[in-house]
Image (cartoon, rainbow, N blue to C red):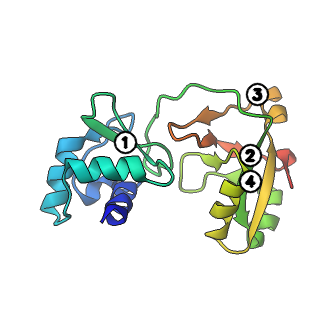
Amino acid sequence: MSKEIGRLLSHVLRHAPERLGIMLDANGWTSVDELIAKARKAEFKIDRALLEETVSTNDKQRFTLSEDRQRIRAAQGHSVPVDLGLDPSEPPLRLFHGTARTNLDAIFAEGLKAGRRQHVHLSMDEDTARRVGERHGKPVILCIDTKRMRDDGLTFLRADNGVWLTESVPPQYLGF
């Protein structure tokens, strides 16, 4: 049941809050009580304990509860406009991005773009990037020269779950 609730939370907190009739504030937060009530009305079997279990056991730590545990939001991955309130951070010298081999020509021509999302997502390690790439086909791991990007004035954010975010990665910063 937790996976079904995880999929629901991912969908409504990142892409379609209107599916349940909830509102996200400017920073992506919504009321836990309202979310549970509206999910139940939509015939999802959820209560606070299941929601908290889903948040704590989600393999990608996609969700964040506020300190008082009264609000919830997605940590990253939004296609709806939100300001996560993250301050620019200095990333490690290298970050990684997993993709499918079939995407390489476009990526090396145009760079990494956010697409329907607000940010490009980058991983701290190659294994995580490989798992992401496997979802799209035969995986390829790209290495991002974050030091050069920072030196050239591009910014990085670190989401609550440790995923690194940036607006785009121009092709000159990409390698293997």
Residue that mark 2 sits on: 169
Q: Which one is nearer the viewer's eye here, 57 or 153?
A: 57
Cβ–Cβ under 8 Å for marks 1 and 2: no
Residue at figure coordinates x 52%, y 29% from the top left? 86
Name which residue lies at 17% across and 54% down.
38
Numbered circle sitting on residue 50: none
| Number of numbered labels in the structure image | 4
Find residue 149 and report its horizontal and vertical position in percent: 79, 35
Q: CA distance from mark 4 to mark 2?
A: 17 Å
Which mark is nearer the camera, 1 or 4? 4
Q: Nearer the viewer, mark 4 or mark 2?
A: 4
The image shows residue 126 at horizontal and vertical percentages of: 74, 54
Q: Who comes first in sequence, dot 3 or dot 1?
A: 1
CA separation in Å, label 4 and label 3 = 25 Å
Q: Which residue is mark 4?
A: 126
Task: Determine the CA span between mark 1 and mark 4.
Answer: 27 Å
Using the rendered view, name the quadrant where residue 176 is placed: bottom right
Quick one: quadrant of the N terminus? bottom left
Type of amino acid under label 4? Glu
- Residue type at mark 3 is Gly
Give the residue at mark 1: 73
- Tell me the element at label 1: strand
Three-letter amino acid code at disc 2?
Answer: Val
Front disc: 1 or 2: 1
Q: Mark 3 and mark 1: span between their CA atoms? A: 29 Å
Identify the residue at image location x=33%, y=32%. 66
In the image, taking residue 161 as reference, residue 109 lies left or right, namely right
Whichever of callouts 1 and 4 sits on the residue coming sooner in the sequence is 1
Give me the C-alpha separation between circle 2 and circle 3: 12 Å
Q: Is residue 116 above or below residue 135?
A: above
The x, y position of residue 137, in whole percent, is 68, 74
